Amino acid sequence: ACYYYYNKKGTLVRAQGPRKDPLGEAQKRCTFKDCAAPTSGKYFFQIDENKRAGGKDWSGLAGMILCEACYNQFIKKGTLERTSNQKRTKSKIVGEDRRCTFPHCTNPDGARKYIQIDAGTRAGEGRDWSQMHGQILCGA
């Protein structure tokens, strides 16, 4: 529990005193300009100048209201901006194309998911996917 608390809050010191008033329904809207779903979320967080969660500098976000997705993005990455890889939507692969093109695949037709590798693929900590461009690979 302590690891997860520190990972999320950036401190092991537990909050003392009364909890802040929850946001009213009218305030439950993410104010980040590029939020993909500003009103759909269960949790919203009003950022104050003393915020320390995740060991990040929240001062530039003071006064904003963030949805849970944007809040967690900032805790993990230290920025609200998503990489182009995260914004990109993957097209569904249907019909005869639902087959792994890797020649040594042991189950090319049996996967639940197939991913087409394109020029924007950046998964795997910046791995170079250029040699795989255009291929369809099976996934979990």
Image (tube, rainbow, N blue to C red):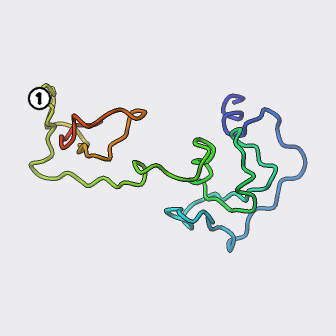
Q: Quadrant of the C terminus?
A: top left
For image coordinates 43% across by 50% down, the residue present is: 86
Please state the horizontal and vertical placement of residue 87, each as a whole percent of the image: 42, 54
Q: Is residue 20 left or right of residue 64?
A: right
- Residue 11 in percent (x, y) is at 77, 35
23 in relation to 47, above or below = below
Q: Residues within 10 Å of mark 1 (few under 14, many from 20)?
A: few
Q: Position of residue 37 (x, y in %)?
A: 51, 64
Q: Quadrant of the N terminus?
A: top right
Image side of residue 26 versus residue 114, left or right: right
Q: Secondary structure at mark 1?
A: loop
For the residue pair 83 and 136, the one nearer the viewer reads as: 83
> Which residue of the protein is positioned furthest toward the bottom in this rendering?
26
Give amino acid for label 1: Pro
Please name whichever residue, 41 or 58, is drawn nearer the observer in this view of the structure: 58
Which residue is denoted by mark 1 in the rendering? 103
